Amino acid sequence: MNIIILDDYQDAVRKLQCASKLDPFNAKVFTNTVKGIGQLAVRLRDAEVLVLIRERTQFPRSLLEKLPRLKLISQTGKAGSHIDIEAATRLGIAVAEGAGSPTSTAELTWALTMAAMRRLPQYIGNLKHGAWQQSGLKSASMPPNFGIGMVLKGKTLGIWGYGRIGQIVAGYGRAFGMQVTVWGSEASRARAQADGYIPAPSQEAFFEACDVLSLHLRLSDQTRGMIKLDHLSLMKPTALIVNTSRAELIEEGALVSALNRGRPGMAAVDVFEIEPILQGHPLLRIENAVCTPHIGYVEQDNYEQFFNAAFDNIINFINGEPTNIVNPEALKVQRE
């Protein structure tokens, strides 16, 4: 069985404890990434099983049709829109999924929140160049003493999306003495209120009230681009927006425009429309943005959980007992 693991940027998979599960199959790991359909088709032409690390590579119909030997895609975590499930089903390619822990992304969200609010990346960067107690945040569009930074206690934390990750982050805010308000579906706001948090009366009031606004929404046709420049412009000049979910939740270009206008005053982001992000991206150039390379889920325990499930799904498939298949109809389609 020809098994290929894609996009292992840090060459971490072979060093996981669960990697021994694939020892009998001599799986091949690619640590570099290619994006073009033609390049991917050449790289994967002999693959019978693919292991995908989250959404690092897209699998549209045009690519799947060029992989005649492919029988199984074993997804780390949940299968998403990066795979054309309908095309995979028609072609007889089963897609298996697993689950990860919300803790790693929730903790990174809080690390970004604290780092951005206390201007740590800016202070650290300037210290390495000999500047003592200088954050460098002194733009005319920024409020007085914006570069000094602020504590979280007594501030308002807004959570948009009260799912597994949002609930954990809300708990962190409460532990730090913040007032927590929640926006989202009616059901989400009801759950938040039952947990002792404050449901926002309206979307506009939510943006206006938040000192820190953290996004925890799934990307879908309904949520894509739902946050507009007008929404961001309602935020305080001292406010921080944190996005560890999906960049596409915010209308393209809106975040950079809002930061340049000074509302909100700061952003901390872990996700980008194109990944890996290209050098020269505006968010990497502006001083009031803190950026990390989509590492919310990139953590040792979470990797073990992700890949343990993905490898079990492969072994079960090979043994004729497929598990966690999201498109079981594919199993009925015979491939040559």
Image: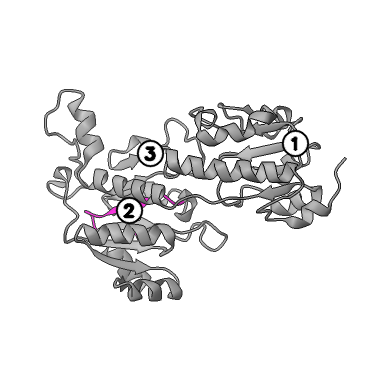
- Label for residue 241? 2
| Residue located at (42% from left, 31% from top) | 280
Residue at label 1?
48
| Residue range highlighted in magenta | 231-245
| Label 3–label 1 contact, CB within 8 A | no
The residue nearer to you, when weighing 304 against 86, is 304
Residue at label 3?
292
Could you tell me if residue 168 is visible in this image? Answer: yes
Q: CA distance from mark 3 to mark 2?
A: 14 Å
The residue nearer to you, when weighing 198 against 268, is 198
Q: CA distance from mark 1 to mark 2?
A: 42 Å
Left or right of 212 on screen, residue 301: right
The residue nearer to you, when weighing 162 against 306, is 306
Mark 1 or 2, nearer chain start: 1
| Residue 178 colored in magenta in the image | no
| Residue located at (47% from left, 55% from top) | 249
| Residue 326 image offset from top left, x and y in percent | 67, 55
